[in-house]
């Protein structure tokens, strides 16, 4: 049974049909890769998965305790925000979208936990430290502000923030795009280790087939807002 199930999602922005009748299913513990050229609808779909945006039509269920059959797009904005804060982690390509650049790195992670309802100072401190450590962020830099850090380190802070709550679902939007190739490899290694050790269900958007090949179990190929192919990564990449 899928953890994430989206059915018949359509969305237009003015005349642009960003998503057309998209179906997506993601199973527990797997890494789903979404590939497609620029403008094909990948980020829009990820924003829907994160409940940041809602479609014109279609429904979305996540297999969370007590909410199995609920169409999450029927929730109010506040309810969507709370559900998202407690259950979904996201890493954006642009760290400015995911981080408060002028707060400390540990403060960024702690803030995420605060939003989700954690109030104990000791728990906030310990969980932030643990998440940064698991993201292979150097703990002696915990007090540094993201603006003072390299791109690779900023992505590790975003990752720590995303996993601090042990989310049911981790969404990654071009997490290594724009980083130096050597740094990309390090961040991918961290993601792979997290996947192996914690079995986090991930959805990874990338235009880079190399990244998808190293990470994804299954792949969705998008073109002009439609899913044109979906299957096991090995099979999708074998096609002529
Ligand atoms: P991708 O992530 O594959 O590059 P996007 O999901 O960003 O594609 O965009 C799909 C299409 O929808 C593009 O034509 C884009 O310009 C359009 N689009 C996405 N978000 C918006 C928005 N908020 N307002 C207007 N058009 C948008
Ligand atoms: P509004 O449209 O009123 O500003 P939204 O709930 O649509 O409220 O979200 C506003 C912004 O907050 C979004 O554009 C998004 O970038 C950010 N956002 C929403 N949910 C998350 C989340 N789980 N993690 C990080 N940023 C989020």
Image: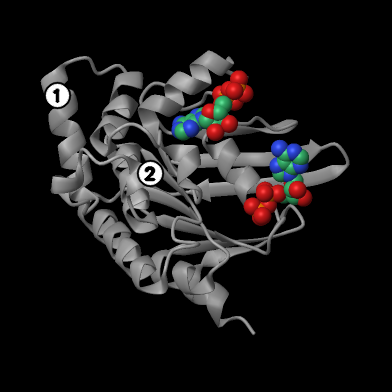
Q: Position of residue 139 (x, y in %)?
A: 15, 46
Q: Position of residue 77 (x, y in %)?
A: 57, 17
On residue 86, the disc is none
Q: Check the image and name the residue furthest to the front.
A: 148
* Of residues 24 and 132, the one drawn nearer to the viewer in this rendering: 132
Picture quarter with the N terminus: top left
* Of residues 214 and 125, the one drawn nearer to the viewer in this rendering: 125
- Residue 150 sits in which quadrant? bottom left
The vertical placement of 183 against 49, above or below, is below
* Of residues 153 and 5, the one drawn nearer to the viewer in this rendering: 153
- The residue carrying mark 2 is 147
The answer to whether one can see residue 109 in this image is yes
Q: Position of residue 96 (x, y in %)?
A: 48, 41
Question: For the point 56% across and 73% down, which residue is it?
Answer: 236
Q: Position of residue 168 (x, y in %)?
A: 35, 38
> In this image, 97 relative to 30: left or right?
right
Disc 2, SS: helix
On residue 123, the disc is 1
> In this image, 224 relative to 188: left or right?
right
The vertical placement of 31 against 106, above or below, is below
Q: How is the image coloured?
A: one colour
Q: Check the image and name the residue furthest to the bottom.
A: 240
- Image quadrant of ligand 2 equals top right
The vertical placement of 74 against 90, above or below, is above
Picture quarter with the C terminus: bottom right
- Label 1 CB-ligand 2 distance < 8 A: no
């Amino acid at each position: 049974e899928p953890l994430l199930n989206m059915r018949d999602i359509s969305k237009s922005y003015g005349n642009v049909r960003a998503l057309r009748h998209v179906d997506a299913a993601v199973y527990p513990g797997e890494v789903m890769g979404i590939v497609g050229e620029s403008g094909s609808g990948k980020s829009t779909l990820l924003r829907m998965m994160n409940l940041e945006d809602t479609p014109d039509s279609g429904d979305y269920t996540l297999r969370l305790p007590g909410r199995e059959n609920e169409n999450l797009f029927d929730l109010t904005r506040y309810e969507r925000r709370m559900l998202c804060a407690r259950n979904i982690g996201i890493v954006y390509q642009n760290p400015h979208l995911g981080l408060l650049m002028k707060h400390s790195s540990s403060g960024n992670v702690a803030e995420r936990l605060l939003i989700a309802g954690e109030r104990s100072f000791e728990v906030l401190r310990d969980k932030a430290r643990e998440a940064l450590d698991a993201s292979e962020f150097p703990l002696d830099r915990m007090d540094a502000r993201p603006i003072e850090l390299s791109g690779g380190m900023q992505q590790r802070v975003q990752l720590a923030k995303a996993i601090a709550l042990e989310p049911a679902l981790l969404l990654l939007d071009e997490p290594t795009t724009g980083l130096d190739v050597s740094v990309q490899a390090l961040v991918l290694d961290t993601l792979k280790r997290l996947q192996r050790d914690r079995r986090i269900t991930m959805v990874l958007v990338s235009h880079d087939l190399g990244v998808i090949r190293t990470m994804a179990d299954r792949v969705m190929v998008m073109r002009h807002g439609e899913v044109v192919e979906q299957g096991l990564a090995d099979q999708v990449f074998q096609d002529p």
